[in-house]
Image (cartoon, rainbow, N blue to C red):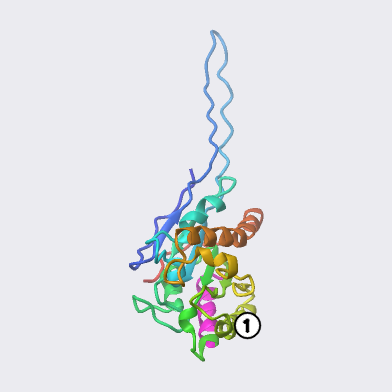
Amino acid sequence: MVSIPAAPPRRPGARLRRARPVVAAAGVLGVLGLGGAAPPPPPPPVAAAAAVEIAVIGDSLSTGAMTPGDAWTDEALPMLDRDGREVYFVNAAENGAGYVARGSYGDTFADEVDHVVSPRTRIVIVFGSDNDLGQPQVGQAAIQTLSRVRALAPSARVIVVGPPAPPAQSRSQLQPLSDALHTAATAFAASFVDALALRWFQSAASVYVGSDGEHPDRSGEAYLARNMADIVQPVIARLTTAPARVQASGRRPG
């Protein structure tokens, strides 16, 4: 079975979600015949693949605000667990948070990074945030957030997902914000997912939004899970084939 270090203390709202590892185990039963020799010892066990820790930095789109509490990360886990490699999320998303905006616990995305990202984090997803609408300094705040990610987890793969435009939001208003995040992601060699261009929660996909016109309902969490799994699975596959460069980590701050 894959051995995972004990999870560090987390502030309220930061949730650990694990996929069940699929690890094959083989046992050898030695039976001695009359006058027979003992069978050879079993081969040494093959070490299980290292677990993939994915930190989620985000807002109410990643907290399960309308489900309640069952975020897309829960449904994405079984889609990402492959070939004996355990995958788990540490979800620091906070309602109302953004790169500039402070959430329900008073945190920005940079604060969320400090709570959950460490050298053992393999993938960091930063998702959102329309809470930063109208903030002129969002580009600089995004650069500071990604700089903090690189400082805490220099080997992690970073995926920046821009804000989508559900029915309650204006795509044209969100476009400058998305562009600023794209620029910041490029500066840090992070992958950028343009949720506006992909039309997440727009047109036919608006059926995945709850009654408030903004947050995903239960079917919407499954919709997000499928989209996120499609984005993250190839990254996990590359981690599986490449030698791990993650350092041993102490406890995370916060």
Residue 76 included in the magenta stretch of the image: no
The residue sitting at 45% across, 62% down in the picture is: 217
Q: Quadrant of residue 68?
A: bottom left
The number of numbered discs placed on residues in the rendered structure image is 1
| Neighbours of disc 1 within 10 Å: few (<14), some (14-19), many (20+) | some
Amino acid type at mark 1: Thr
Q: Which residue is mark 1?
A: 183
Q: Is residue 162 above or below residue 121?
A: below
Image coordinates of residue 251 in percent, x first then y, are: 40, 65
Which SS type dominates the magenta stretch?
helix
Residue 105: give x, y in percent of width and height: 34, 75
| Of residues 55 and 34, the one drawn nearer to the viewer in this rendering | 55
> Which residue is most to the bottom?
136
Secondary structure at numbered mark 1: helix
Give residue 101's position: percent from left, percent from top.
43, 83
Whether residue 248 is visible, yes or no, is no
In the displayed structure image, the side of residue 188 where residue 5 appears, left or right = left
Question: Is 244 on the left-hand or right-hand side of 76?
Answer: right
Give the magenta range. Answer: 140-154
**Where is residue 124 drawn, in percent x and y?**
53, 67
**Is residue 80 in view from this perspective?**
yes
Is 56 placed above or below 239 here? Answer: below
Image quarter (top left, top right, bottom left or bottom right) of the C terminus:
bottom left
Q: Say which of 111 and 207 sits in front.
A: 207
